[in-house]
Image: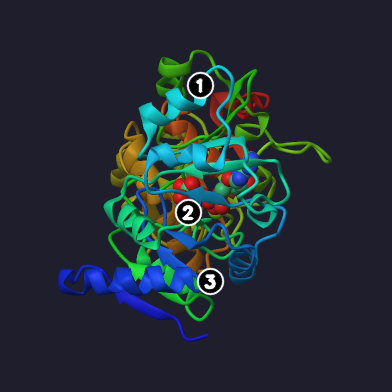
Amino acid sequence: MNTKILDLSNTSSFDSALALAADTVRKGGLVAFPTETVYGLGADALDPEASKKIYAAKGRPSDNPLIVHIAEPAEVFDYAFPDSRGIAEKLCSSFMPGPLTVVLKKKSIIPDEVTGGLDTVAIRCPSDPVAHAFIAACGVPIAAPSANLSGKPSPTRASHVIDDLDGRVDLILCGEDSAIGLESTIVLVTNERVKLLRPGFITVPQLESVVGKIEIDKAVTDKLRDGERPLAPGMKYRHYAPQAPVTMIKGEDSDVRRFFAEALLDGSAVICFDEDLEFLGGFSTSSGAPIVFSLGPQNDHLTQAKRLFDALRTLDRKEVRQIYSRLPEKDGVGLAVFNRLIKACGFCIKRIGEFKNEDNRDLR
Ligand code: TXA
Ligand code: MG
């Protein structure tokens, strides 16, 4: 397939790019577009054949449902039923437009192909102006997963989308880098409970300030046992995994830095914090420059979120054999960074120094 790639930074062609994108969607085609979280791969959510094309283009298993993207928050209830306690309405009025996805009982207008046969639908209203303009121009809800090949890190830059999907989709709209860099927070809302299925930029304390205490699905922090099923089917797949094995290192700062320095000399790559860089600067392998990628300052979860997927893709391109990474704190947006990293490393945490004999309490 010949993929059209349009640069949106040229404002004179913005309207015509959007018109072409909307026309492509209405004809059943696939359009990749920027959002504030990550780039999405969109198609008409009311057209089952268009959704099937998304699964084929990404190589995505058909039991992994798609998020339905809408232009205005009020449209949530065109496609899903509210819960009996009014919790969904509260969440939508507090966090939409924005990086929150709500999972609710679906209305019959949403095809089974979009929801992987589930009787619920995930709905999100992006705040990114380009995403909003694109969805509004289409005039239909847009089914969109992240615009990466299945199993690759989500795309946070137009170049990531081109790397994965050139030749597999009709159109790629190239905008700015994603402002947040991790996918939306997903919550399941039933008449009985609110449950966090995937952590993101909207944090647990923010959600609880609006709806009271929420539950956290085990799959957010724990490795599931064989046969256990997460409530968000996508969480069961080995996501965001670079080619090289990733291990997270837990220990005192000084111990972790020493470990990283030895690993670099050995030809491994390191994902660290800014505070580590000074110490690691002097270490290089005989074969060339060490491969060090900083996620940002240790306490700056927002910068870490923004850089993580780019770090994993960059290290993938360098074809390193082993990647060692810092372990982010699990508070606020840090929980989302931690969640993506434990999936990238297949829950592999190595404890050093005084943490050596600790059990698996990080994974709880
Ligand atoms: O930020 C985002 O959410 C991005 C942008 C493009 O909006 N989209 C995104 O989509 O991350 P995707 O397909 O990569 O991840 C969607 C997740 C999957 O884990 C899927 O299993 C889950 O949402 N999901 C979708 N519908 C669901 C449902 N009805 N019940 C439970 N989980 C659902
Ligand atoms: Mg995805």
Q: Amino acid at mark 3?
A: Gly
Q: Earlier in the sequence, mark 3 or mark 1?
A: 3
Q: Amino acid at mark 2?
A: Pro
Q: Up-down: is 275 above or below 214?
A: below
Secondary structure found at label 3:
loop
Camera-nearest residue between 73 and 149: 73
Camera-nearest residue between 299 and 3: 3
Relative image position of residue 272 (x, y in whole percent)? 40, 45
10 Å crowding of disc 2: few (<14), some (14-19), many (20+) = many
Numbered label attached to residue 28 = 3
10 Å crowding of disc 1: few (<14), some (14-19), many (20+) = some
In three-dimensional space, the C-alpha distance between marks 3 and 1, rounded to whole angstroms, equals: 34 Å
Secondary structure found at label 2:
loop
In three-dimensional space, the C-alpha distance between marks 3 and 2, rounded to whole angstroms, equals: 13 Å
Q: Earlier in the sequence, mark 3 or mark 2?
A: 3
Residue that sits furthest to the bottom in the current view = 2
- The residue beneath circle 2 is 141
Judge whether residue 262 can be spotted in this image: no
Task: Please identify the quadrant where the C terminus is shown.
Answer: top right
Relative image position of residue 315 (x, y in whole percent)? 47, 62
10 Å crowding of disc 3: few (<14), some (14-19), many (20+) = some
Numbered label attached to residue 87 = 1
Whether disc 1's CB lies below 8 Å from ligand 1 is answered no
Q: Amino acid at mark 1?
A: Ile
Give left or right: position of 23 versus 177.
right
